[in-house]
């Protein structure tokens, strides 16, 4: 395999750090950027000192002056948790817009391939179920979540424009809920929240009636999907996620059982515009990439609980 030189934004984040592991394992060279607004150097500290790995604390909303020629640009920098994008709406809009443009410019400069991690939030609170890539979504353009949804929709449009106008070889991954080791404990998303609460013996905070659904994909499956997508000729968005759909009440029960507690639940208000149902249709990924998730929820959750246990004892 040819040695590839990769530029990764959001490299100290949850998925970004696992992607760096994979690219290095495949023999690539990685230049990793992160402004640490939500990422953590802890996620990549095991890579420091590796000859093919360079990390720079850098905010990709600023013009990128990274020299040398890249073969592949990965734009993962994003505030993906509702807790953080609600706290930093302007930075979130910037990471979808200015940062995407800066990363695309590097791909254009170098004739590199470009992949952006977009989101199932492009479908908003979907009126079609499961969500197929050809569904255009049901997004509130001025709601609290719009900073995330609309900037990702803009990022997709910008990516297509760079492909159509400048011939950049682009890919768009629409990532559905993903979980695994290296999620931040204070991330606010349901996986770390429930696990943290269960491991501390506290009641699990179910928002609303808990009948809203999500589908959870383990991070190793997600990284495999991203790598396959980057190697494909598909320019339009591709859903990547696990189609197994659960209500948040069912999910709370699963996590309680896994941690071995009785699992009390407290209901808290549902955040505004919280999607009621979310499940990827992955027929396109199966067909175009030959990809589907391999890790069963039970196994992935067990790995993740083990990680959070060590985090709680070392935090
Ligand atoms: N949720 C919950 N309790 C929590 C955190 C989240 O019930 O402590 C719910 C949230 O309302 C949503 C689902 O879990 O319906 C997934 O939320 P998350 O923040 O993980 O990501 P989202 O899919 O909304 O982007």
Image (cartoon, rainbow, N blue to C red):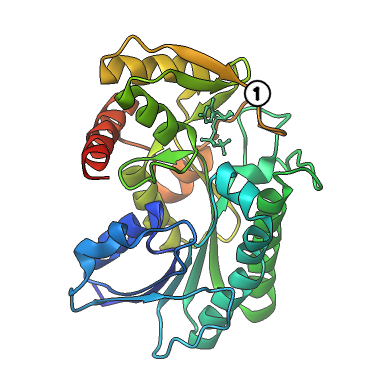
- Quadrant containing ligand 1: top right
Label 1 CB less than 8 angstroms from ligand 1: no
SS label for mark 1: loop
Q: Percent x, y for residue 146?
A: 73, 48
Is residue 23 depicted above or below 212 in this figure?
A: below
Q: Percent x, y for residue 81?
A: 54, 45
Is residue 150 depicted above or below 215 in this figure?
A: below
Residue 25 visible somewhere in the drawing: no
Q: Percent x, y for residue 7?
A: 41, 74
Using the rendered view, name the quadrant where residue 196 is placed. Answer: top left
Is residue 218 depicted above or below 20 in this figure?
A: above
Nearer-the-camera pick, 240 or 304? 304
Quadrant for the N terminus, please: bottom left
Numbered disc total: 1
Quadrant for the C terminus, please: top left
Query: As drawn, is 29 to the left or to the right of 101?
Result: left
Which residue is at a point 55% across and 67% down the rendered structure image?
Answer: 170
Residue 146 visible somewhere in the drawing: yes
Nearer-the-camera pick, 85 or 224? 85
Mark 1 closeness class: few <14, some 14–19, many ≥20 residues within 10 Å: few
The residue where tag 1 is placed is: 269
Which residue is at a point 63% across and 62% down the rendered structure image?
Answer: 91
Which residue is at a point 40% across and 87% down the rendered structure image?
Answer: 69
């Amino acid at each position: 395999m040819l040695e590839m030189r990769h530029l990764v934004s959001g490299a100290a984040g949850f998925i970004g750090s696992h992607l760096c592991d994979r690219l290095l394992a495949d023999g690539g060279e990685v230049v990793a950027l992160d402004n640490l607004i939500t990422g953590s150097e802890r996620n990549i500290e095991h890579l420091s000192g590796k000859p093919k790995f360079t990390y720079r604390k850098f905010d990709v909303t600023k013009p990128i002056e990274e020299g040398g020629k890249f073969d592949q640009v990965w734009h993962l920098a994003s505030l993906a948790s509702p807790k953080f994008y609600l706290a930093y709406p302007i930075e979130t809009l910037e990471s979808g817009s200015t940062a995407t443009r800066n990363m695309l410019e590097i791909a254009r400069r170098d004739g590199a391939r470009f992949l952006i991690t977009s989101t199932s939030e492009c479908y908003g609170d979907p009126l079609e179920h499961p969500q197929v890539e050809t569904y255009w979504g049901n997004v509130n353009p001025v709601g609290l979540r719009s900073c995330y949804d609309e900037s990702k929709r803009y990022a997709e449009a910008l990516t297509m424009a760079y492909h159509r106008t400048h011939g950049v070889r682009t890919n768009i991954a629409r990532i559905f809920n993903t979980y695994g080791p290296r999620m931040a404990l204070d991330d606010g998303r349901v996986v770390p929240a429930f696990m943290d609460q269960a491991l501390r013996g506290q009641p699990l905070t179910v928002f609303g009636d808990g009948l809203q659904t999500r589908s959870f994909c383990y991070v190793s499956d997600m990284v495999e999907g991203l790598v396959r997508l980057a190697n494909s000729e598909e320019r339009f968005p591709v859903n990547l996620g696990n189609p197994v759909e659960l209500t948040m009440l069912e999910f709370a029960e699963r996590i309680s059982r896994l941690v071995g507690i009785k699992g009390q639940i407290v209901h808290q208000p549902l955040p505004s515009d919280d999607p009621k149902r979310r499940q990827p249709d992955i027929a396109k990924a199966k067909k175009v990439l030959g990809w589907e998730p391999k890790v069963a929820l039970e196994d992935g959750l067990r790995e993740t609980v083990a990680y959070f246990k060590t985090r709680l004892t070392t935090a």
